[in-house]
Amino acid sequence: MPEANVLLKMVTTRLDQEKFRQQHWEGSFSEYLDAAVKNPRVVRNSFQRLYDMILSYGRRSTTS
């Protein structure tokens, strides 16, 4: 288990806990539904968000 401890220490030293708190929303289910009505992109799952990130960089043709 020494390797696990080393890995855990690396993660905790690089983690900015305050930034993590700012980026993660907490609230009631009712507040979540209100946010989803205002911005439907809130309800996208991780696969959809990853797809959005890929598309945001655009596309290049591989032909010369």
Image: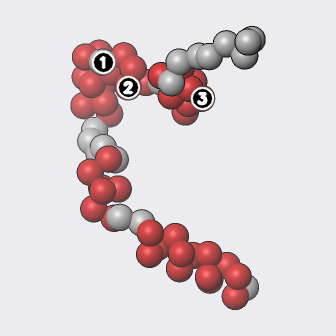
Mark 1, other Cα within 10 Å: few <14 / some 14–19 / many ≥20: few
Q: Secondary structure at mark 2?
A: helix
Q: Secondary structure at mark 3?
A: helix
> x%, y% of residue 32?
31, 30
20 horizontally vs 2: left or right: left
From what the image shows, is residue 54 above or below residue 24?
A: above
Q: How is the image coloured?
A: secondary structure
Q: Report the residue marked by disc 3.
A: 47
Do residues under tags 2 and 1 come within 8 Å of each other at their CB atoms? yes
Q: Report the residue marked by disc 1.
A: 39
Relative depth, front residue between 55 and 43: 55
Relative depth, front residue between 27 and 50: 50
3 horizontally vs 16: left or right: right
Which quarter of the figure is the N terminus placed in?
bottom right
The amino acid on which the numbered mark 3 sits, given as a three-letter code, is: Phe
Q: Is residue 30 visible?
A: no
Q: CA distance from mark 2 to mark 1?
A: 6 Å
Numbered label attached to residue 42 = 2
> x%, y% of residue 38?
25, 16
Which quarter of the figure is the C terminus placed in?
top right
Q: Point out the tag, 3 or 2, that comes first from the N-terminus.
A: 2
Mark 2, other Cα within 10 Å: few <14 / some 14–19 / many ≥20: few
Relative depth, front residue between 14 and 39: 14
64 horizontally vs 6: left or right: right
Q: Name the quadrant containing residue 31.
A: top left
The amino acid on which the numbered mark 1 sits, given as a three-letter code, is: Asn
